[in-house]
Image (cartoon, rainbow, N blue to C red):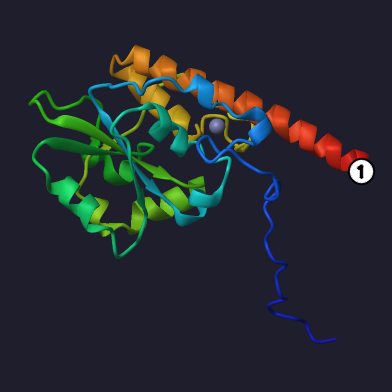
């Protein structure tokens, strides 16, 4: 029998895609965490998320939690060749010191930094928000990012993110990367705020998922 080279793929239906979600926190309505969000924290740094387009629709995306609780967080959709003008303008803005957050490597050791500039510019941490595979691709292929300094968060944290298990415990999820950076640069209050909200999200999401799984089993 002839081998089928490209069997048709089944349409992708995300688990839980039929669940009605809160439009603000994106958790199922019965587990909404909005009341725990509080006023946005205002640390002296900013986060700019470059989000892979698949992440916009994933309810388990934690990058959006950063935007929910940290003031001035910006979210851009990543594009390999056509980054939006607003991002390019910001990268050239003398008021900011943009810095790409990524694991260290000998391949770009000359770009690695571990301190923030003390010249009054606002540190802007650019986090590549996608799976690790996507993030590596985004890092490698985005020419407009290739002149930026790179910072690896210094942290002993292991990932607590239970919704998407990585094979390597050290691979923090997007919100955990931001928490680690806030802690590293003395923004403990903002770090605690984001961590509290992240933990609440994690916990409520899992409980809600359990309830829905049980409801489906009981049908
Ligand atoms: Zn909500």
Against 128, is 208 above or below?
above
Against 162, is 3 above or below?
below
Classify the position of the N terminus by image quarter: bottom right
**Residue furthest toward the bottom?**
2
Residue 45, quarter of picture: top left
The quadrant of the rendered image in which ligand 1 is seen is top right
Whether residue 146 sits left or right of residue 204 in the image: it is left
Q: Residues within 10 Å of mark 1 (few under 14, many from 20)?
A: few
- Helix, strand or loop at disc 1? loop
Residue 85, quarter of picture: bottom left
Residue at 18 percent across and 47 percent down: it is 91
Against 70, is 98 above or below?
below
Whether residue 2 sits left or right of residue 100 in the image: it is right
The percent coordinates of residue 171 (x first, y second) are: 51, 34
Residue occupied by mark 1: 219
The percent coordinates of residue 137 (x first, y second) are: 42, 55
The percent coordinates of residue 17 (x first, y second) are: 67, 50
Residue at 85 percent across and 37 percent down: it is 215
Whether residue 104 sits left or right of residue 159 in the image: it is left
């Amino acid at each position: 029998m002839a081998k089928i080279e490209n069997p048709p793929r089944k349409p992708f239906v995300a688990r839980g895609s039929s669940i009605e979600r809160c439009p603000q926190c994106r958790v199922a309505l019965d587990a909404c965490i909005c009341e725990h969000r509080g006023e946005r924290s205002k640390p002296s740094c900013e986060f700019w998320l470059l989000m892979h387009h698949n992440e916009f629709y994933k309810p388990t995306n934690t990058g959006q939690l950063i935007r929910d609780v940290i003031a001035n967080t910006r979210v851009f959709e990543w594009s390999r060749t056509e980054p939006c003008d607003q991002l390019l303008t910001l990268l050239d803005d003398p008021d900011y010191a943009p810095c790409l957050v990524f694991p260290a490597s000998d391949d770009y050791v000359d770009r690695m930094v571990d301190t923030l500039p003390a010249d009054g510019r606002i540190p802007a941490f650019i986090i590549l928000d996608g799976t690790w595979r996507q993030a590596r691709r985004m890092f490698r292929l985005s020419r407009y990012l290739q002149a930026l300094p790179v910072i690896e968060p210094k942290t002993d944290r292991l990932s607590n993110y239970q919704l998407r298990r990585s094979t390597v415990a050290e691979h923090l999820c997007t919100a955990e990367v931001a928490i680690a950076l806030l802690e590293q640069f003395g923004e403990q209050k903002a770090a605690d705020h984001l961590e509290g909200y992240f933990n609440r999200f994690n916990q409520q999401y899992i409980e809600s998922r359990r309830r829905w799984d049980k409801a489906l089993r009981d049908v």
